[in-house]
Image (spheres, grey):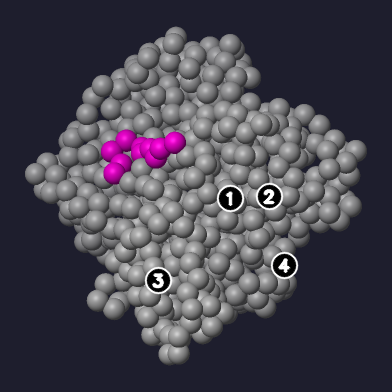
Amino acid sequence: MIRVQFFGLLRLLLRKESVELPSEPGDTVGRVLERAEKTLTGPIIHKLAAGGVLNAGTIILVNRRNVLHLQGLETPVNDGDTVALFPPGAGG
Amino acid sequence: MKNGWNGKVLRVNLSTRTCAIEDLNMAWAREYLGGRGLGSKYLTEEVAPETDPLSPDNKLILVTGPLTGTYGAANGRYMAVTKSPLTGTIASSNSGGYFPNELKFAGFDLVIIEGKADRPVYLKIHNQRAEVADATHLWGKSTNETEDMILREFHADAKVACIGPAGEKLVRFACIVNDKHRAAGRSGVGAVMGSKYLKAVAVRGTGGVGVADAPAFREAARETFRMLRSHPVTAEGLPALGTAVLMNVINQSGALPTRNFQSGTFEGAEEISGERLAQTYLKRNKGCMGCVIGCGRVTALSDPRWSGNGEGPEYETLWALGAACGIADLAAITKANYLCNEYGMDTITAGSTVACAMELYQQGLVTEAETGIPLTFGSGEALVRMFELIGTGEGFGARLGLGSWGLAESYGVPELSMTVKKLEFPAYDGRGIQGMALEYATSNRGACHVRGYMVSPEILGVPEKLDPQVTEGKAGWTKAFQDFTAVVDSAGICLFTTFAIGAPQVTNLLNTATGLNLSQDQVLAAGERVWNLERVFNLKAGISPSQDTLPPRLLQEPLPDGPMKGEVAKLGAMLPDYYRVRGWDEGGVPTAEKLATLGLV
């Protein structure tokens, strides 16, 4: 299974902290997002990316590693991995 | 005047109880803009660097920027500039709300407070009339009570900045609270006010703020509004979740300092996150004057142990009172946050000092005989109790009131104080974010995040994503962030606007408001000028470049867990490069050539 966690606005919108999805061969962050969206009550991808490119400020971590330092939406996701989704947010 | 500045300075001598109105030094205003820059210029001209911060010779300067009080976006900011009693460095603490605009509406750009009263007083400003009034009846009152009493006896529409009992008792991290819930928080500016027996500054102003080119300024402001309202951070993230949205981000990134920096992840982060606050005590968001972001948190606490109403906690507070102390008790944190506001003390240093005390207790150096309660990591009850003691100056609270450096040093272990230049770190571990390590080491007021917020590129990916563990290039980024932030702090707008707008927009706002015709490079040079001015003051005050460093824990003890496990702060790989890009010599001293370029000699 792959655990997808929702933070920030996504959690407020979905009223859900996480979902678990069965893993599939060749999974990537992008494919997991598409599958997650189908199981949810509301769309999520538009909060994170547009045209296959992450929005400025979007943070997606696979096992706590930022995908921007891996392969972006093409980052491989394996069974047992955790994908954390943070729409743009900031503070200080 | 119709160019952002009012052109007037109010000078108040508390020793003689006299108020005088002077013309603003316009040459300085053009060079240093306002706020942090202009206040620092006046301070460095009028206060000797070696001055004892709590002596009558120190001055307290409350200073607005040329954009404060205009209808440009998020313009409700002012700075409290003085020499810090916590660090001995130059201090400039920023706050928003409604008080800053009111100062402008009263017709002043800055208020210089000097000397010392012989008994408690407060300053009443009604447009161009100013008076030093008795405040004996206000002494000892909380910030909330003080403001309410002043509004009743002075003017119902006045705006008030005041100190609480912590400032009166010279707690070294006392803050100045305005509009009840906003604070010029860091560096102990409230203790300077307390040392002068000045309880409050109350202002009623009914004028306006003119700008040089109204149609062009209106268009510049509109562009800013459009950008703030369309950027996901300023339009959605900050209004809905406030700064506390960062708790889970920073924890998952492995850079959330936990238990006095003993680790970089906190198992209780979810319990003290912005998401959790939104599901529990949050009632609504709130903005300062003219703000379309509204990051403020209006909260109501209902818990079997405590209840109350107020604002906050925001991210830094949730961290300092939470993860730093190993506390996952949101009710205790919210209660302790309210106490900080009412006593008038900086939440970051207050929480970090208790965290330090908890480690001293863990090591057996502090005992329950001193504290009256087991001071164990994770105890929300102990946190609340310690804050009560600090605010009232009772018992162990008097030692905590020195800040973590003074506390740890008094037990012979200053290395357990998580500070740079005696100012406590905020909520990001430099071992997990290398640019922040450099920013902390070099900031002119000590370990501060709002002098060059490298978290933005290194973690949040704004304006672009940098690898937090790469050291190459971080010196240039840090300098650029520091200089631009100095501009923002001097202009009178909120730093949070810069998640959406950049130097072109700030330059446009400044030019159309002031009538100056500065290039973007000239605006950034003004920021660099401010940075170097502060640096030179600190050097003369005896803060040597050897203090551009970090506690041994960050330099030598690798993070024990999380995605940044094994990392230390690689300061040595960045600091020489930083001195070079700053145009300073190898020892960290600004060269004569650099100072001449900036017009500082």
Mark 4 touching mark 2, by CB under 8 A?
no
Q: Nearer the viewer, mark 1 or mark 3?
A: 3
Query: Marks 1 and 4, how far apart in space?
Result: 28 Å
The answer to whether residue A45 is visible is: yes
Number of callouts in the render? 4
Give the residue pinned by disc 1.
B272
Q: Is residue B290 magenta?
A: yes
Q: Where is residue B224 drawn, in percent x and y?
A: 22, 52
Secondary structure at badge 3 equals helix
Can you identify the residue that label 4 sits on?
B552
Depth check: give the residue in front, B398 or B528. B398
Residue at image position (48%, 82%) is A23
Range of magenta residues: B283-292
Q: Are marks 3 and 4 on the same chain?
A: no
Quickly name the residue at label 3: A36
The residue located at (44%, 72%) in the rendering is A60
Res B170 seen here: no
**Mark 1 touches mark 2? (CB < 8 Å):** yes
Q: Quadrant of residue B339?
A: top right
